[in-house]
Amino acid sequence: MPQALERAEGGWAWVVLLATMVTQGLTLGFPTCIGIFFTDLQHEFQASNSETSWIPSILTAMLHAGGPLCSILVGRFGCRVTAMLGGVLASLGMVAGSFCHTLNQLYFAVGFISGLGMCFSFQSTIIVLSFYFNRRRVLANALASVGVSLGITLWPLLARYLLENLGWRGTFFVFGGVFLHCCVCGAILRPVATSAAAETRERPPPPPKTPTRSCLAACGWALQRHLGFDIFWHNAGYRVFTLGVMWMILGFPLPHVFLVPYAMRHGVDEHRAALLISIIGFSNIFLRPMAGLLAGRQDFAGHRKYLFSLAILLNGLTNLVCTASADFRVLVGYCLVYSVSMSGIGALLFQVLMDVVSMDQFSRALGLCTILESISILVSPPVAGLVLDTTNNNFSYVFCMSSFFLISAGLFMGGSFCALQKKEKRGRQAEAEAAATEAALERALTVEGPRSEKQLCTEVMYVTSV
């Protein structure tokens, strides 16, 4: 028996928003607490900074790179089933990680399996939320991103407490149970009744009656359908956004991974070092909704791209503080200022993407954007770890590296969006002038038509009178 579809902007939309908030806290908030285990994992496996950095790198990369596969599953089975499958995979990966005896096993269990499961749960909620909200979409995205702030606040505190009492293996095992809550959140994602929400249907569409494709042709067709390469080629705004975010991600995750070991290396107590990440998350709880409300105002509708670029630029400039001092009070101030820019990036990231592409293209555009982001995420922490190994654990180089990528990305995106806006304005003016010229020509022809007819009639009358 087919299930009745929910109404967009209805009462159930707010329940879906709550489920999205919890899911984002469980998935996007989790990678920030990996730094808590950094030292213990190094000692356990006798690994270098670069080798240990591959764990959060693979985890976060899969959290983004699984986007195309998530789109296929959503189109086939719906958001609800995909999100629940993600919760199961994330749980299994963490439980398996607690029994690993080599780093390679940990890469696969925690990095690949758990990361892919988090991707399924996270992106399914983002897709369905975009169809549940139309008029309040900016506010909904900002409120959903509050879940990330809650996750960033609570994950480090929970990780620190469990690490002291259970060790890292017991902590990973408990985390496996925590990720099963993604299944509960996924069960809430009922399909929504909108004409554009083809991705959220529960039953698969009937197979098209087309000739059997070869394996290579089928792969090419799937890539073309679920990845927005055509959007990337034809939409300049989406191209600027994707390249800018890809460059930004090379520096954005580094403070989350290395802030705790950086503080501990400079004599900050373990509990206070873990508290720094929680300060960032707690501040974002209040700052992200404010950023969402500000961005949702009609006055700022045309300026969201520039606010996003400004937030990236501020984030890069803030990281330079860590190169000057490692005093705990200075780091607390750094975390507070960092939270302002981070909240702007988190609240505006998906909204800017929705501004530059149409909603019927959003799922494909998100899939391509996230898989390109994953390349940057996969490279960034290991490269930073290699920098630490070659500079005798000098964290200043890591924060300088982060600042460089963020500042250059902010300048690139702001300048490119400004140039595209001017080009679009000139194009509209040229079209208006062409339309005005055409209208004037039509009026001239209309005026000349009756005159010619009148002159012809006069001439005929003259000949007749003679």
Image (cartoon, rainbow, N blue to C red):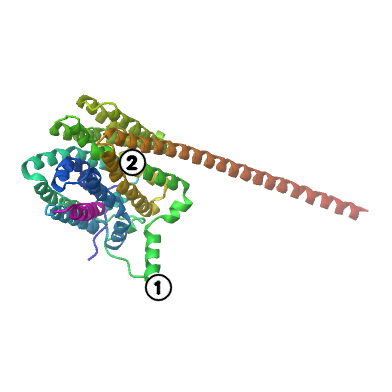
Q: Position of residue 306 (x, y in %)?
A: 41, 36
Q: Nearer the viewer, mark 2 or mark 1?
A: 1
Residue at image x 89%, y 51%? 462
- Residue 142: within the magenta? no
Q: Quadrant of residue 321?
A: top left
Q: Which residue is mark 1?
A: 210
Q: What's the mark number on residue 416?
A: none
Q: Position of residue 149 (x, y in %)?
A: 23, 38
The quadrant in which the N terminus is found is bottom left
Of the image marks 2 and 1, the number of the one nearer the N terminus: 2
Q: Quadrant of residue 269?
A: top left
Residue at image x 32%, y 33%? 341
Q: Which residues are magenta?
A: 101-119
- Residues at marks 2 and 1 touching, judged by CB atoms closer than 8 Å: no
Any part of residue 140 in sight: no
Kindly report the secondary structure that dominates the magenta region of the rendered protein.
helix
Q: Which residue is mark 2?
A: 138
The answer for how far apart the CA atoms under marks 2 and 1 are is 40 Å
Any part of residue 345 in sight: yes
